[in-house]
Each structure stands twice: as C-alpha cells, then as structure tokens.
Image (cartoon, coloured by chain):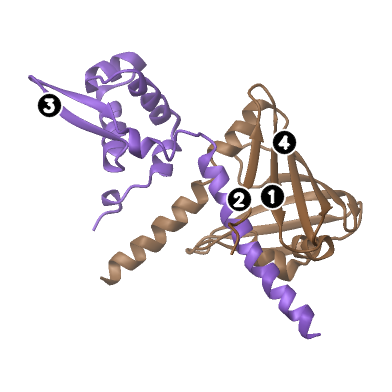
Amino acid sequence: MSRTMRRDVFQAIADPTRRDILGLLSRQSLTPNAVADSFGISRQAVSKHIKILTECGLVHIEPKGRERLCTLEPAALSTVSDWIAPFRKLWEDKFDKLDQLLNTLSSEDNEN
Amino acid sequence: MKTKNQTHITTLPGGQDILIVREFEAPREKVFRAFTDPAILGQWLMTAPMKARIDRWDTFAGGQYRYVFIDPSGNELGSKGMVHEYLVPERIIQTYEFEPLPEKGHVQLRTTRFETLPNDRTRVQIQILCQSEADRDGMIGSSMEPMLKAGHEVLDGLLEKM
C-alpha cells in the first residue's frame, strides 16, 4: 500500500503553494487549468497539488459540462482554516502529556 | 471532572513573536521542576511517535542546553542554546536555535515565566521572539513537519505488517 493513500490535512497545508491554492478556491470554484493560470506554474505541478488536496478531503472535483471544477470542502477546511492550528496542536499535545506527568509527580510527593 | 486547560497562542500580523500561555493544576515549584528536570522534560518535550533526549541542561545563567528529537527511524533533530537567566522558580531566558535549519544564524530568544495562581495552580507563559516575521511564520508553518514524517513512517511500518 502506498503512502499516498493516506494524506493528512496538516501535510497538505505545510506546502505554501497548496495554501495559496486553498486561498484561491475559498473565493470561487475553479477548473484545474484556471488554478494553473492564476499561479503561472505548470499544469502538471498544479495537478499534483490538487491531487494531494483531494486525497485529504480539502478539495473535491466535480464535473461541470466538459470541464472539471475544483471546489473547497468547507468542513475539512474548518480544521485548518486557522494557519496556526498545527503549531497549536503540537503544544496542546505536549501540555496534555505534561498534565499527566504532573499528576504522577503529585502522587509520588504524597507518598513521600 | 473539569475540562482540560486551554492552550492560548497569540501571534500578531507584522510581529515577530509568539506568546504561548497555559495553566496547570499544580503548584509553581512542581511545574518549574517538570520544565527543568531533564528526566521529566524528556518525557513531554516531544509527543509520540517522536521521542526526545536531553543531552545537556545547565541550570545556571551562562550555561548551555541541547536536546534532540528522534524520529522512529532514528534520525535526530537537535536544538540548542545558551541560558541567559535561570531564576528558580520564576523565569528562564534562553537563546534557541533549531540545528537542522539550512541556514545558520536564525536564533530565537525564549522567555518562560511561571506565575503562581490561587488554589495551587500555575500559569506558564512562553514568549518566543524571532529575528524576523519571516522566521516566526516559517517556524509556525513547519512545526508539524517532523511529526508528520514520523507519523507516516510509523504508518508505513504498520501497513507493511498487515
């Protein structure tokens, strides 16, 4: 099984181009070609970024006539709309662990 | 049981610092010890699947510290700095540099304050002052990358066994 089968939203937004694509799509749904034109980078590169964004559920692609339209998935985005979210999560996880350790220290001190 | 304490993180547009504030259900001396005893610090400084190892931790002004984060493959990501002030149990001021950065010289000034609250509680404030707004935003933007890489390596290992 390849690692591309499971994507993490935080991995998706770690890349500045993908963050810019999300910003663009937050204003309007666009075709992949229109996204590429907005950035002046190759369609292949944009296609790769959009693939990652769809794999982690941040963007979905729906047919519109003969074109395909990239649309932002608001529910998935709510977890990452705050750009500081991954940084916050890291510290929250550390402090949660510290809470547990402080409890352990408390019981040790009571026994002594 | 009461809900867990919230972690408040403040960054201002155009600024170059980050303020992290968190309260703990333990008296100040105990929280200070958890932040400074290498045996305890090593247990919470990084969360699974990464591990932390404290190589050096001087508890006096003018001293040094160094610790590393270790990913499941054994790769080590070092952090180091100098201790500018070490005031038990109130305040620690350190420089901080993340060693894997591609360019030297991006050093931060980190101030950790421990404030006594009623009912044997403690408020900890960590101020991280970077040399530029770009340094600060770069650190925030990349803060999860080592964790993500480590998480995916663990996942790959699990999938191989399935």
What secondary structure is marked by label 1?
strand
Q: Nearer the viewer, residue B74 or A15?
A: A15
Whether marks 2 and 3 lie on the same chain: yes
**Kind of residue indicated by mark 4:** Gly
- Residue under pointer 4: B105
**Kind of residue indicated by mark 2:** Trp
Q: Colour of chain A?
A: purple
The numbered disc on residue B22 is 1
Mark 1 surroundings: few (<14), some (14-19) or many (≥20) residues within 10 A: some
CB atoms at circles 1 and 2 under 8 Å apart?
yes
Q: Where in the figure is residue A45, as x and y percent of width and height? A: 30, 28
Residue A20 vs residue A25: left or right? right
Residue at horizontal 33%, vertical 23%? A25
> Label 4, label 2: how many angstroms apart (C-alpha)?
24 Å
Instruction: Tell me the subunit letter for badge 3.
Output: A
Residue at horizontal 87%, vertical 60%? B59
Tell me the mark number nearer the camera, choosing from 4 and 2: 2
Whether marks 4 and 1 lie on the same chain: yes
CB atoms at circles 4 and 2 under 8 Å apart?
no
Whether marks 3 and 1 lie on the same chain: no
- Residue under pointer 3: A63
CB atoms at circles 3 and 1 under 8 Å apart?
no
Q: Where in the figure is residue A103, as x and y percent of width and height? A: 68, 71
Note whether residue B52 is visible: no
Q: Earlier in the sequence, mark 4 or mark 1?
A: 1
Residue at horizontal 26%, vertical 51%? A5
